[in-house]
Image (cartoon, rainbow, N blue to C red):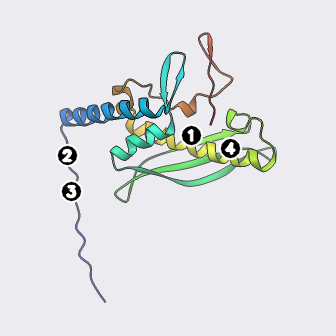
Amino acid sequence: MTTKNVAIREPIELTPAEVVENATAQAKLLMDIVERTGCFQLIAKKRYLQVEAWETIGAFNRTHAITESVKPIMRDNEVVGYEADVKLWKDGVVVGGATMPCFFTENACKGKEAEAKHKAAMSAAQTFATSKAYRMSFSYVAILAGYEPTPAEEITGGDTIGDMKKEHWC
């Protein structure tokens, strides 16, 4: 039998000022990346980050998303959409997560039939849950960068903000 030595790293405690300084540095980098890549949506003159921008914030914090499951949503013995459960991992530990649905009535599925509709809903549910998980842990970085804390993926067609129709295309 062999034994392994395992080094246990103590968490680094940051002061509130250090947290704000770090988040501000992330926000400045994020603004540059988002503006260059266009991974945001302008809705009613407000800027909402898309999943790629949320994943960038996660990368700044050595955090990544893993889809734990995608399950069908049933109504009257019929699949009407899918629900995804996503966890955020950092250094081998779950540090956040979210569960989000995508129904066949959402923009991601419009115009799709049969298996394509199912694939679109499964994929969109994972995207929605990923954005939401990062938002739950890192919305303060988005706010410091001047973006709305709600992920663009949560803003779906059919609703209105003031005089403007909200639209989302996956």
Decide: is 61 above or below 17: below
Circles 3 and 2 in contact, beta carbons < 8 Å: no
Query: Which residue shows up at 59% across the image and 54% down it?
Result: 69
126, 87: nearer the viewer: 126
Q: Label 2 to label 1, Cα distance in Å?
A: 31 Å
Label 3 or label 1, whichever comes before in sequence order: 3
Q: Label 3 to label 2, Cα distance in Å?
A: 9 Å
Q: Label 3 to label 1, Cα distance in Å?
A: 33 Å
Dot 2 corresponds to which residue? 13
Label 4 or label 2, whichever comes before in sequence order: 2
Q: Picture coordinates of residue 115 (x, y %)?
A: 77, 50
**Label 2 environment density (alpha carbons within 10 Å; few <14, some 14–19, many ≥20):** few
* Amino acid type shown at disc 1: Phe
Instruction: Classify mark 3: helix, strand or loop.
Output: loop
Foreground mark, 4 or 2, reads 4
**Label 1 environment density (alpha carbons within 10 Å; few <14, some 14–19, many ≥20):** many
Left or right, 111 with reference to 154: right
Left or right, 89 with reference to 121: left
Residue 25 sits in which quadrant?
Answer: top left
Q: Label 4 to label 2, Cα distance in Å?
A: 41 Å
Dot 1 corresponds to which residue? 128
Dot 3 corresponds to which residue? 10
Quadrant that contains the N terminus: bottom left
Query: Which residue shows up at 37% across the image and 46% down it?
Result: 59
Circles 3 and 1 in contact, beta carbons < 8 Å: no
Query: Which residue shows up at 34% across the image and 50% down it?
Result: 62
* Amino acid type shown at disc 2: Glu
Dot 4 corresponds to which residue? 121
